[in-house]
Image: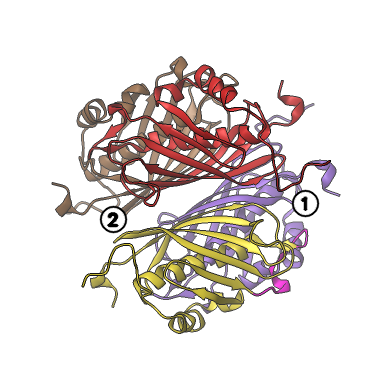
Chain colours: A brown, B red, C purple, D yellow
């Protein structure tokens, strides 16, 4: 029986994504990024806290939040289209909402639209200390999906 | 004689900003960020190339570009308001334009509007290999300027 | 007893907001904007379909969606801070997700962060024809809240 | 002889674009949009002032600025790819910089990147009263260019 449009299947297993993170995205290791949850409709990544994240004021620097959000969108896109490593961000917008104290950062990503050429997703970032009800940042981002013939 | 609105003065010298980068923003050191040029109307920062910047496809990862752009906006704001370290990004939008090959990244920041509470700036990112006529990304960002009484 | 942070109260009734729309925002009338729902944690506005919304391809033009989303954020902010008409948008980002066919457009707005100086909200736009599960656009926007002494 | 990448030619004449505005984009007429300048590397549109643009505070409403900027990007894209009316905005970000008093609004658009599938442009909006040195808003936007086989 045909799979329904409303039930997309996971196109990549979590272990394969962890391998991509570990071997192909060195900045993800620099940022201590781990995978907490990996499904076709929801991905959760975590940046394990490190003193190198800090900025003046004793809070976590914006680039850490942006890097984690971008990785979460990448994970979400690959969970839906498979190991198309050449998918690239075309745009990203972030609103910083609250200052994250020194603690792990968590990123929840969900898809807004998966098209043939573009995927648009949304990421909510929260601090393990503040909890999910008080997000520290909100991100939307667009990935360009390379056409099949250019994926090698 | 009163300073004219059209002639803002530099409120921070480059050595003071380098000290903030070195001692207060550890991620900037992780990203190899240097100051090329530092004036009140134009700041140029550089991320010295490192293999850890790479992503699949052999190009530089988005988070490196976002981190460099954010640091350039921070530098630009401080060049105009002085060492107000607690100025924080409230939003940032980036459009990725071209894929940067392995080479230094350069960020040129200029102010669009400096208000009492918000500063809005624009950053053009280019790769030393492609040159300034073919920018690799374009960024706009907003910084919140803390009121004087809370800057202690 | 102090009101709890988790229980914001509605600071403006829907009739007062309708009056602001009708008398103070003429473009809202041009766009056929109505209020469907108005609470402190959720506002829903509607743009009643008009052939003047169309663009090539027979779908609704982007500016109609942006105008409706901006009005929905304004409504949401006023529902929380009262009739502070001088609250102004400082930034807005929209991702267009699907093409809306000729039908009413609906905008659901919810608050991401209400601070003293800035409010950040999120709007999901959908077409009455496609339904809320297939949004046509996603918007985030920031409003600047004027300090009490400048509200007259 | 092949045209050089650095010398794009105008792919649409201004009269053809004026016809598209007049016959295919009714909201542009509602907003009083005219073409001031139309070349392959720079387009300038104008929204002729109308009292219906006003919002509380006696300044011009955000949706007027967003609509004008979107039209300017559309004009710029068509100036470069020809009368591909089905080109659609995929994302747009605006930063509001200054409050425009009652006067004509002018939008200057220039291309940041014209690719095969996406075009990214930048728009500076200014008020005829304040002049181009004090822009009232800054916009970036992305248009999706339909593949040739779907342009009929």
> Which disc, if any, is residue C54?
none
| Dot 1 and dot 2 residues touching (CB under 8 Å) | no
Disc 1 target residue: C83
User: Which residue occupies the extreme front position in the image?
Assistant: B1
Q: Quadrant of the N terminus of chain C?
A: top right
Q: Visible in this render: residue D147?
A: yes
Q: Judge left or right: residue A138 versus residue A73.
A: right
User: Is D22 covered by the magenta stretch?
Assistant: no
Q: Residue A60: give x, y in percent of width and height.
A: 51, 24
Q: In the figure, C20 relative to C122: above or below?
A: below
Q: In the figure, D133 relative to B11: above or below?
A: below
Residue drawn at point x = 76 percent, y = 67 percent: C23
Q: In the figure, A53 relative to C108: above or below?
A: above
> Which disc, if any, is residue A117?
2
Q: Judge left or right: residue C152 versus residue A32.
A: right
Q: Residues within 10 Å of mark 1 (few under 14, many from 20)?
A: some
Give the residues in magenta: D48-58
Which picture quadrant has residue B67? top left
Q: Judge left or right: residue A13 versus residue B152.
A: left
Q: Residue B87: give x, y in percent of width and height.
A: 62, 31
Q: In the figure, B147 relative to B4: above or below?
A: above
Q: Residue B88: give x, y in percent of width and height.
A: 59, 32
Q: Visible in this render: residue A1?
A: no
Residue drawn at point x = 46 percent, y = 71 percent: D75
Instruction: Identify which residue, B124 or C61, lies in the foreground.
Output: B124
Q: Judge left or right: residue A20 versus residue D47.
A: left
Q: Secondary structure at mark 1?
A: loop
Q: Residues within 10 Å of mark 2 (few under 14, many from 20)?
A: few
Q: What is the CA distance from the residue labelled 1 to the residue labelled 2?
A: 43 Å
* Chain letter belonging to callout 2: A
Residue drawn at point x = 43 percent, y = 83 percent: D16
């Amino acid at each position: 029986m045909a799979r329904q449009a409303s039930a997309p299947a996971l196109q990549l297993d979590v272990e394969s994504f962890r391998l991509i993170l570990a071997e192909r995205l060195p900045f993800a290791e620099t940022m201590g990024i781990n995978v907490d949850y990996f499904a076709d409709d929801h991905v959760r990544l975590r940046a394990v806290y490190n003193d190198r994240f800090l900025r003046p004021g004793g809070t976590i620097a914006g680039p850490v939040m942006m890097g984690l959000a971008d990785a979460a969108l990448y994970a979400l896109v690959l969970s839906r289209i498979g190991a198309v490593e050449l998918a690239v961000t075309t745009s990203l917008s972030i609103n910083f909402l609250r200052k994250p104290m020194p603690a792990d950062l968590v990123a929840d990503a969900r898809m807004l639209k998966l098209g043939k050429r573009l995927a648009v997703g949304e990421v909510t970032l929260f601090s393990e200390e503040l909890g999910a009800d008080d997000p520290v940042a909100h991100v939307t981002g667009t990935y360009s999906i390379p056409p099949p013939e250019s994926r090698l």
